Image (cartoon, grey):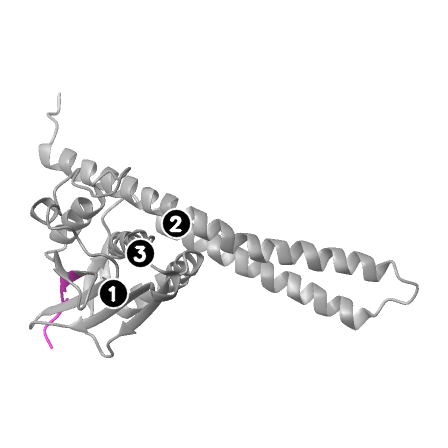
Amino acid sequence: MTKPDPEAEIHQLQLRLAQVARLAAIGEMSGGLAHELNQPLTAVANYAQACDRMLGMPDPDIGEIRGALKEITAQAVRAGDIIHRLRTLARHDRLDSELTDLNALLGELTGLIQLDARAHQVRCNFELAAHLPPISVDRAQIQQVIVSLVRNSIEALAEAIAATREISVRTRRSSPGTVEIVVCDNGPGVAASILPCLFDPFCSSKPHGTGLGLAISRTILRTHQGSLDYRPNTPRGACFIVRLPIAAEE
């Protein structure tokens, strides 16, 4: 009888935890995304009703009907694109590293993040440095980390005045051989009482938080020979810094 491989079992457990965290992040985004998804679906219904009314007229304007049908197509494509991006983020069950352009990886998330931020009246700015060297990563896992960090910032801004809520996502080259993704907000920051255990499992300041998001994110980054750190933002708020090694020497 073949003995179980402890390393393989640990690896599978990490993958399952990562999948749970990814689905949890999507669940947290669902309220805002449902609102955004409802907009194109409502538009489709309205344009369809307009077509029905126009076709019932004695002398329908074919040009106007065609215009409404084009709008139906555009809005359906918009709704389908939201669903496709959600499925891409959710469907992943193995470590699969590949040579990746960091800014392109973030670009795939921009639409989803902006929809979620807008639904919570948060302004999210992307500042992506040009000409970054490639990295070798599991794209879905790194995207999961970024979504989790942005979601944390959105939740931290819930009590702030809507007009002042801001998040920035920046990429840059840091020390030799390393690139960074920095997610900052202007919320209340991390409480001093939480700092010592910030990245420990089950450490959370949220009333209903699991305290697993940052712990799993740091584990994912360590498997990529990277790191996740925290520093206070200036003049207020929180910054989380993701560091990843570049894939090749220049």
Question: Real-space Cα distance between discs 1 and 2?
Answer: 25 Å
User: How many numbered tags mark residues here?
Assistant: 3
Q: Secondary structure at mark 3?
A: loop
Residue at the image position 12 percent from the left and 70 percent from the top: 248
Q: Quadrant of residue 74?
A: bottom right
Is residue 7 or residue 168 the one in the foreground? 168
Quarter of the N terminus within the rendering: top left
Q: Residue at x 41, y 60 (%)?
A: 121
Extreme residue in the front direction: 161
Q: Amino acid at mark 2?
A: Met
Which residues, given as a range, are shown in magenta?
Answer: 241-250
Residue under label 2, please give it.
Answer: 29
As shown in the figure, which amino acid type bears the numbered disc 3?
Leu
Residue 140 drawn at (x, y percent) = 29, 53
Give the label, 3 or 2, closer to the camera.
3
**Residue occupying the far right of the picture:** 58
Residue 132 in sight:
yes
Task: Please state if 73 lies on the left or on the right of 96 as rendered.
Answer: right
| Mark 1 or mark 2, whichever is nearer to me | 2
